[in-house]
């Protein structure tokens, strides 16, 4: 995948949709690639983490315990996973497992904050997006 493709992928995510493409170029250039085989875990509930992930290809199964049973959600290309761990020093919630061969990009907390320091518009857009998501949840 090219940087241009990565920028288009980021631009489609609500968190980054209002961010200038030149700023997303910087973020896309520094993101790490992660490849998972079918059934491989990305993270477990309670694991310490410092990154969010965007599904580039394949599918992730997200599992979370909800009382007496697990709740499963499958996410595919363009899904942003674990953004709360990217923003704050909190452990991963739930478990993420590859369904088939899956490729992701990893956005670490340090990377996000470095880019946000350089481009305050990115930070403002991220805060608005998180606020909107919280308002919908509440």
Image (cartoon, rainbow, N blue to C red):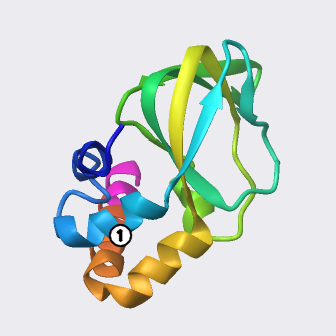
Q: Nearer the viewer, residue 67 or 40?
A: 40
View extreme (front): residue: 2
Residue 116 appearing in the image:
yes
* Residue 126 relative to residue 49: left or right: left
Up-down: is 113 above or below 40? below
User: Residue 57 appears at what percent x and percent y?
Assistant: 43, 24
Residue 19 appearing in the image:
no
Identify the residue shown where x is 33% and y is 59%.
Answer: 135
Identify the residue shown where x is 41% and y is 24%.
Answer: 76
Disc 1 target residue: 26
User: Residue 136 appears at what percent x and percent y?
Assistant: 32, 51
Q: Residues within 10 Å of mark 1 (few under 14, many from 20)?
A: some
Quarter placement of the N terminus: top left
Which quadrant holds residue 60?
A: top right
Magenta residues, start to end? 133-138
Identify the residue shown where x is 58% and y is 15%.
Answer: 101
């Amino acid at each position: 995948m090219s940087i241009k493709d990565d920028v288009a992928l980021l631009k489609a995510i609500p968190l980054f949709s209002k961010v200038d493409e030149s700023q997303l170029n910087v973020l896309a250039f520094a993101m790490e690639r992660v490849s998972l085989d079918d059934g491989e875990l990305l993270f477990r509930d309670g694991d310490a983490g410092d990154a969010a992930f965007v599904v580039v290809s394949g599918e992730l199964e997200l599992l979370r315990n909800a009382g007496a049973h697990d709740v499963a959600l499958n996410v595919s290309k363009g899904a942003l996973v674990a953004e709360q761990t990217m923003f704050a020093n909190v452990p991963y919630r739930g478990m993420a497992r590859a369904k088939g061969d899956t490729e992701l990009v990893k956005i670490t907390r340090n990377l996000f904050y470095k880019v946000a320091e350089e481009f305050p518009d990115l930070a403002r857009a991220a805060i608005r997006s998180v606020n909107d998501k919280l308002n919908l949840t509440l």
